[in-house]
Image (cartoon, grey):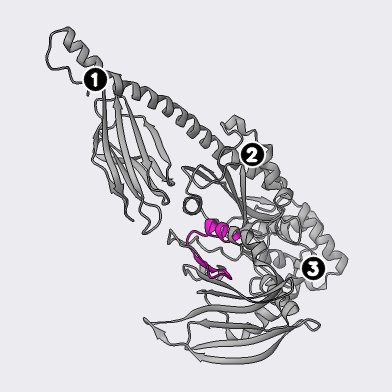
Amino acid sequence: MDATEAVGILPDVYIRLTMDGQNGANETYTLRVMDNGSGIPAHQMPLALGQFLFSSKYKIKQARGTFGLGGTMTILYGQITTNKPVIVTSGTGTSRIVEYKLMIDIERNRPIILDRKIHVNPLKDGERWHGTIVELHLGKGSYAQASAKVLEYLKQTAIVNPYANITFVDPKGRLYKFNRTVTQIPPPPKETDPHPHGVDVETIQRIIRSTNARNMYDFMRRNFHRVGDKTAAQFLKAANIPAKTNPKRLKPEEIVTLVQKMKEFEGFLPPDASCLSPLGEDLLRAGVLKELEPEFVAVRRRDPATYLGHPFIVEIAIAYGGKVPARDEVLLYRFANKIPLVYDESGDVCWRIVRSVNWRRYNVAANMPVAVLIHLCSTKIPYKTVGKEILSDQAEVSKEILNAIREVARELALYLSRKERVRRQVRRLNVFARYLPKIAQFSAGLNGVEKPPETDKLYRSQQVFKEYATKDEFAESEPFDSRLYKTVLVHVANKHEANAVNVRVLGMAGSQWTELIPESTLTSGSELYETLRGIFKQVKVQVKSSKPGKEGLIDAIVDGVSE
């Protein structure tokens, strides 16, 4: 994903898992992964995938990975369990595609090149292919046991990357497609210098080896984030370090002291968030609507904050109904730098925070379909273990997560309260619809009038859609004249057995249409009841299919009630 986002390419990821055979209880598989990213330069391919701690991302900015361990560890596992090489093919958009057959020399930590081929990269529609293909063999596994986690991981990846196409073919040939619903990519993070509060001894030593500064004053100004002339001078004075000291002549114990003084000094400006790439509220909402199809979703992105000198941003979503399963407790999805965290949930600080919330205060009871999604992006995710599945309890991060949950939970509470009021209103309207015509007819008979009086000024019901098959683009209903009515109620039902639809309601105030009910998803068999508040001349309903080519079946009624 990083290889596509960095160059502004919408990601297309293809994954195929094929079963090779079975030896007793052990099953062997071939895993093929292909992307359309920027590709790996030919001279770097063996080192990038055949050597530990080789990475092009030793920079201070948000990234999904840093040290290049994930891919190399997977290749090594396959080598250990099957003794078969990995085949890596990559193109960078030039006239050549390079293919390597590799194994890893574990003792020397270097790649063993078994074969190297060069293929012609033909022009297609004026472009040449770019991307990377990795094909490796895995042993000692059972897809039948792990399939649920694999599919859950892909689903959550699609939630937090709604601009990506992800295709997966499992060992039985079943095809799973997670199609993009947006074409907007988050702005890429900018590289920045390390902040003095976030460095350690190893980082300082690395900076000293590469710097051309001849004194500590220039060393501080040139190599650290948001450290200017004045701040550098104030820090050196507070730390009792001569400004003319050559950093390359610092002794090991002096470097340790320098790091301690940096962490203690309070005069450094906090880091900015230009090195982060959050999803943003619109993309996170799009991902939730795409995969969970809730009837209600609220999203909040908190302002940038810092912990231990590392900038971070918390993004939270809460979803109700739709495909969210009903459980005794709130369903929790965790993400870090756009990567799902699917294991060891109970040990994560996010779960402790979710459980600490008094959900009854927000009208949420047991067995309600409610999900909370927490996305943390940072230059350094505070993982609790080396497995990178559990977030540790950093006070600043925990505070932001809790405050964000409270904000979206308040929106959910308002929605649930409004939904209950609408239910009462529906019962009231049913009484009006049943008895008003009879009362009018009875009154006319008492007064000897043949024609009963019109009841439209008191109550009117208009069916604006009847068994309408939705299309990929929004279709709008006939306008409902709402000038006579104080309360207008919209009832939309999706009668399709499988497909979801998207619904929104517009009202005309003055001469312009405004959005009264934002776009929301109705899963198969679900309904929307909403009471509209305000003075509007007309009201109309818009509907479309949630997914391309998957039509829904809509009934929609608009009711108006006078004083």
Q: Nearer the viewer, residue 306 or 171?
A: 171
**Is residue 521 shown to the viewer in this render?**
yes
50 left or right, relative to 507: right
Q: Is residue 12 above or below residue 453?
A: below
Reply yes or no: does residue 123 show up in magenta. no
Helix, strand or loop at label 2? It is: loop
- Residue at the disc numbered 2: 328
Q: Is residue 144 above or below residue 396?
A: below
Quarter of the figure that contains the N terminus = bottom right
Tell me the magenta residue range: 153-175
Q: Position of residue 327 (x, y in %)?
A: 61, 41
- The residue under the point 67% across, 85% down is 102
Q: State the separation of the CA atoms marked 3 and 2.
A: 63 Å
Earlier-in-chain disc, 3 versus 2: 3
Residue neighbourhood size for the residue with mark 3, other residues' Cα within 10 Å, grouped as few (<14), some (14–19), many (≥20): some
Marks 1/2 in contact by CB < 8 Å: the verdict is: no
- Residue at the disc numbered 3: 245
Q: State the separation of the CA atoms marked 1 and 2.
A: 46 Å
* Kind of residue sitting beneath label 3: Thr
**Is residue 211 shown to the viewer in this render?**
no
Q: Is residue 110 above or below residue 442?
A: below
- The residue under the point 54% across, 68% down is 168
Q: Nearer the viewer, residue 5 or 439?
A: 439
- Residue at the disc numbered 1: 437
- The residue under the point 65% across, 56% down is 341
